[in-house]
Image (tube, rainbow, N blue to C red):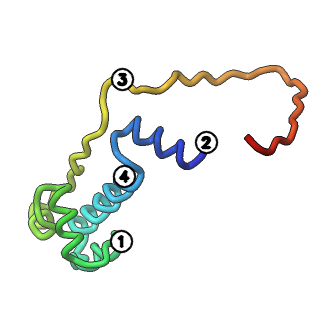
Amino acid sequence: MSRFHWHRVFRALTGETCAQAVLRIRLHRAAGWLVQGDMPIAQAAARAGYPNLNRFSRAFSNAYGSSPAAFRRQGQIRLPNPTLRTGSYPMHDVIIRTDPARRLAGLPHKGA
């Protein structure tokens, strides 16, 4: 499937964009670095891909409900609160089947 269609499918299934998922995963990794080691917060922010500490702190606080320093003091790794979609999905059922071999023909086409 094309990357554009993949983005639509991913958003329909999870309720978040691919970019939002990447940021959520990066923040989760940073949360682990903060709790499990003595890495400075600025270094965890840089490793997570944030250009400065302010942006990291703001994103981390939005995801976890506390600042990186307070999160470290608590000493517990917990998941951010993603608002993933639940319920029915507007997707067709996927059926995987094995068909017998057959010959196919293709014709090149240009234009409308």
**Residue 13 percent across, percent down from the top left:** 40, 35
| Image side of residue 27 versus residue 75, left or right | right
Q: Residue tagged by mark 1? A: 49
Quadrant containing the C terminus is top right
Q: Secondary structure at mark 3?
A: loop
Query: Which of the labelled discs sits on residue 13, or is there none?
Result: none
What residue do we see at 15% from left, 61% from top?
Answer: 61
Mark 4 / mark 1, whichever is N-terminal: 4
Q: Residue tagged by mark 4? A: 21
Does 33 sit above or below residue 42? above
**Residue 64 percent across, percent down from the top left:** 17, 55
Q: Residue tagged by mark 2? A: 1
Does 78 sit above or below residue 107? below
Q: Residue tagged by mark 3? A: 88
Crowding around mark 1 (Cα neighbors within 10 Å: few <14, some 14 to 19, many 20+) is some
* Amino acid, disc 4: Ala
Mark 4 / mark 2, whichever is N-terminal: 2
Q: Quadrant of residue 32?
A: bottom left
> Are discs 1 and 3 less than 8 Å apart at CB?
no
Quadrant containing the N terminus is top right
Distance between the alpha carbons at the discs numbered 4 and 1: 14 Å
